[in-house]
Amino acid sequence: MTPYKCVIIDHDLDSINGLQRYLSLMPELVLVNTYTDPLLALTEIKSCAHLDIILTDIEMPDIAGTEFFNDLRHKASKLVFTTANTQYASETLGLNADAYLVKPYSLINFVTMIVKLLTDQPVEQPVSDHYPFFFVKNKQNNARLTKIDFADVIAVESKLNDVMIHTVHEKILTSISLTEVARLLQRDNRFVKVQRSFIINTHHIVHIDGNTIKMNQGTSVTVGEQYRTLFAEFVTGRLLKSAVKK
């Protein structure tokens, strides 16, 4: 059997290395190239032979809008998005992607997704966490374990080596990284990363003024430049428009 030709595009080298390792365990797949520069990737892919699978991150520097991904779509039989943001992951099927992987993903998740793609089976979206809550150690309360409902989280803010979890009841400071929190929240599509130091719960948005998001309990967040295009598309997809009167 002729191996399926694959390309990886991701600005994060750790993500590329992880995918390379998984690909090496599947003899039916062959890695043609990897790219950390999406513009270089697009230039070279446009001039190469048709590919079987392109695996690409959806949040990368210098990439705005959907044109980049549409160009990739024409050069591959299967287009797979990899992302740490579940909210944007759920939008990828609208960009003509065949599947997505939510970071961090296991070898089992990867193999299952690839097998379904190659046999033209539908790839399901990830389900929400079975438990509607989690626990953290509250630094402001003698490291006491505090139960937090996902629905009560308004936003999560990075504070150097800690994070501040803004909830409808209180603000809780805990000694974990924003990356760790993102992994916990990634299965719940209410949560969106809108800048390097902020993840918000879209259900708690009160109003949006330009690039400023006003949340419940007075929390205000400015959308980072890198995240503005995708967040704008998220909002536009949920914007009610009145019919044109004749």
Image (cartoon, grey):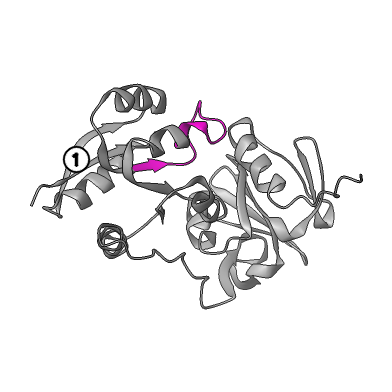
- Is residue 192 visible in the rendered structure shown here? yes
Nearest the camera: 60 or 48? 48
The residue at the far front in this view is 246
Q: Give the magenta-colored segment's residue range.
A: 55-69
Image coords of residue 15 (percent x, y): 33, 44
> Please, is residue 51 above or below residue 147 in the view?
above
Nearest the camera: 99 or 214? 99
Image coords of residue 158 (percent x, y): 60, 46
The residue at the far right in this view is 246
**Residue 140 placement: quadrant:** bottom right
Residue sitting at 13 percent across and 52 percent down?
A: 28
Question: Where's the C terminus, which quadrant?
Answer: top right
Q: For the residue carrying disc 1, how many other residues have a C-alpha within 10 Å: few (<14), some (14-19), or many (20+)?
A: some
Image coords of residue 3 (percent x, y): 13, 47
Magenta highlight: main SS: loop
Name the residue type under label 1: Leu
Residue to which mark 1 is pinned? 31
Nearest the camera: 43 or 84? 43
Direction from residue 51 to residue 83 in the image, left or right: right
Residue 60 lies within the magenta run? yes
The residue at the far left in this view is 1
